[in-house]
Image (spheres, rainbow, N blue to C red):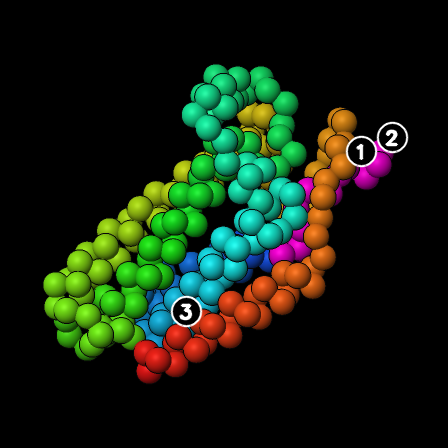
Amino acid sequence: MNTEEKSVRVWDLPTRLFHWALVVLIALQFATAEFGFLSMQWHYRFGWATLALIVFRVLWGFAGSQTSRFADFVRGPRAVAGYVRAMFSAPAHIGHNPLGGWSVVAMLLCVLAQAMSGLFASDGIDEDGPFVDAVSGATVKLATRLHHLGENVLLILIALHIAAVLLHRLLKHDDLITPMITGRKPAAQPAPMRFVSGWRALLLFLVVAALTLALASQGQ
């Protein structure tokens, strides 16, 4: 058999689009906040887009295809410990492995916290989040501290994610990048996966986007 005949569909299109869109949006937000790329108004717009994206992914974690669902990759401590003990000898997982599953959860929570805290953060000079006037000064200070702290946490999570991808490639010869582009991954014993219609994802994203736009309009 050739590689194509041995490959199995792993990631649906919505999950892959989410992954790469999040990469782009996070890069743009760092560029606007730290390097003066474009204006801070664009930072806020990218923040709203990120919030919509994260909310969509959380919902897709319950309504999406098999490998996109939290139930498929969020495992208990025993499963995580077992994976860590046999990390470099165990066969590659079709979807997220037990440790990688929790890294996904951590990344989603961190980015969500960044997006939410940014709504109420202020630099104390001329840049305020869209809902600064709706909360107390103490809340603004707390949100600002959390937003700055979250930036560092996010950088650490990104570094760990990149390191994990490289380690899988170099030590386990497990390519994690190509499947997130093509949606397919070689498998010795391909197992049938359950995928849902892309129309469900489109409808879900449109609803989330509409609600996010409505919320953003309240913060103008």
Give whichever of discs 2 and 1 has the lower sequence position.
2
Q: Please tell me which residue is depicted at 66% across the width and 55% down the height of the picture.
A: 13
Describe residue 54's horizontal placement relative to residue 64 as left or right. left
Q: Which residue is mark 1?
A: 6
SS label for mark 1: helix
**Between 206 and 184, which is closer to the camera in this rendering?**
206
Q: Amino acid at mark 2?
A: Met
Q: Amino acid at mark 1?
A: Lys
Q: Is residue 8 magenta?
A: yes
Give the residue at the far left of this rendering: 138
Residue 28 in view here: no
Give whichever of discs 3 and 1 has the lower sequence position.
1
Q: Which residue is mark 2?
A: 1
Q: CA distance from mark 3 to mark 2?
A: 47 Å
Which quadrant, please, contains the N terminus?
Answer: top right
Q: CA distance from mark 2 to mark 1?
A: 7 Å
Q: Please tell me which residue is depicted at 62% across the width and 57% down the height of the picture.
A: 14
SS label for mark 3: helix
Instruction: State which mark lies toward you, 3 or 1.
Output: 3
Kindly check if marks 2 and 1 are in contact, taking CB atoms under 8 A apart as contact. Answer: yes
**Between 102 and 160, which is closer to the camera in this rendering?**
102
Quarter of the view holding residue 144: bottom left
| Vertical order, 67 against 55 (above or below) | above
Q: Position of residue 139 (x, y in %)?
A: 17, 63
- Mark 2 Cα shell of 10 Å, populated few (<14), some (14-19), many (≥20): few
Query: Magenta region: which residues?
Result: 1-15
Kindly check if marks 3 and 1 are in contact, taking CB atoms under 8 A apart as contact. Answer: no
Give the number of the disc on residue 48: 3
Describe residue 30's horizontal placement relative to residue 95 as left or right. left
